[in-house]
Amino acid sequence: MLSKEDQRRFEQITRQLRESDPEFFARLDHRARARRGRYLMLLTVVLWASLPAATVLAGRPAGAIFAAVLLANAAVMWRFRRRWW
């Protein structure tokens, strides 16, 4: 955790960088977004793969809830896919 003075200085440096070289800053921002998208996709695949085990171990109602949550996650990922790729 940064102290308030360090945080203020960091924000000042970031602001100057954003103003002086917007192309560089946009590339960095795009890479971070793409990385988050890959992690979210990996998490989704792992959760879908664990759905059968969760259904067997916790029962059908829990499996149905698990599947509904994953379907909602898939819908959100599909809706906002442009932000992550």
Image: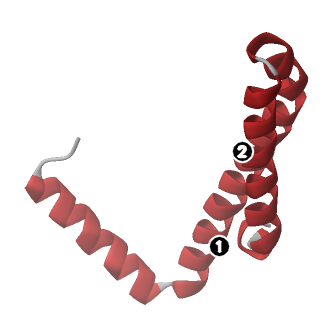
- Can residue 42 be seen in this snapshot? no
Q: In terms of image quadrants, where is residue 65? A: top right
Return the x and y of residue 69 as percentages of the image width and height.
72, 46
Return the x and y of residue 12 as percentages of the image width and height.
24, 73
Say what secondary structure mark 2 lies in: helix
Q: Quadrant of the C terminus?
A: bottom right
Badge nearest the viewer, 1 or 2:
2
4 sits to left or right of 63: left
Q: Mark 1 to mark 2: distance in Å?
A: 19 Å
Q: Amino acid at mark 1?
A: Arg
Q: Amino acid at mark 2?
A: Tyr
Give the crowd class for mark 1: few <14, some 14-19, many >=20 residues within 10 Å: few
Label 2 near label 1: C-beta < 8 Å?
Answer: no
Q: Residue at x 12, y 48 (%)?
A: 3
**Front residue of this view, candidates 49 and 65:** 65
Q: Residue at x 71, y 73 (%)?
A: 83
- Can residue 2 be seen in this snapshot? yes
The color scheme shown is secondary structure
Farthest residue to the top: give it: 57
Relative to 69, say whether 30 is above or below.
Answer: below
Per the rendering, the mark at residue 38 is none
Query: Badge 2 is on which residue?
Result: 39
- Total numbered labels placed on residues in the image: 2
Give the crowd class for mark 2: few <14, some 14-19, many >=20 residues within 10 Å: few
**Front residue of this view, candidates 84 and 66:** 66
Say what secondary structure mark 1 lies in: helix
Relative to 84, say whether 15 is above or below.
Answer: below
**Front residue of this view, candidates 18 and 42:** 42
Return the x and y of residue 73 as percentages of the image width and height.
74, 54
Query: Badge 1 is on which residue?
Result: 27
Among the two numbered marks 1 and 2 on one chain, the one whose residue lies closer to the N terminus: 1
Q: In terms of image quadrants, where is residue 82? A: bottom right
